[in-house]
Amino acid sequence: MNEYNHSEHLHRFGCWAAAAAVRRGFTSNEKIIQAIESIKLRKQLIQLSGEDLSDESFTTHHKIWANGLIEELKKTVTTKEKVTYGRAAKIIAVSLLSGIIENHKRSSLIKTRVTADFRLCAI
């Protein structure tokens, strides 16, 4: 188990917030958080945080994360038709936002991407 520090607290809050953003009429927080953890989204975001990603590179990563979330969620939810790219994108967007809270220096990955992700989620 990870040491419980400020970074871990923000990560857990980010997972909860992402789950809360998509769970209504869908599934439980626990299943959504399990999917986030299973694709190691936090670790991947931290690894990419120092890189200056092009739009194309970010889109490639985003598709991998979203498809991973979809695959993991389909293993546990009973309403598989509700496992959509839009829900996965919203989970990723909230995870990116929690990264802004945790460390504002991750701007190359986060700041320019969150607005676009939330525009996609609003559709």
Image (cartoon, rainbow, N blue to C red):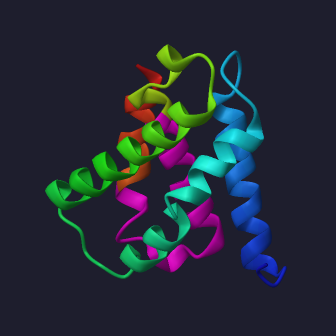
The picture places residue 70, in percent across and down from the top left corner, at 45, 37
Figure check: 45 above or below 6: above
Residue at 37 percent of width and 82 percent of height: 50
Q: Quadrant of residue 25?
A: top right
Picture quadrant where residue 5 is located: bottom right
- On the image, the x and y values in percent for residue 102 come to 64, 72
Q: Residue furthest front?
A: 75
User: Residue 104: horizontal and vertical position, in percent?
Assistant: 54, 74
- Quarter holding the N terminus? bottom right
Measuring from the top left, give residue 61's x and y in whole percent. 29, 57
Tell me, yes or no, whether the highlighted magenta stretch contains residue 89.
yes
Which secondary structure type mostly characterizes the magenta part of the structure?
helix
Q: Nearer the viewer, residue 47 or 108?
A: 47
77 relative to 114 in the view: left or right: right
Where is 87 relative to 64, above or below? above
Name the residue: 17% across, 63% down.
54
Along the viewing direction, whichever of 69 and 97 lies nearer the viewer:
69
How many labels sit on residues? 0
Which stretch appears magenta? 88-112
Q: Residue furthest right?
A: 4
Query: Could you tell me which residue is drawn at 75 percent across and 48 percent down?
Result: 16
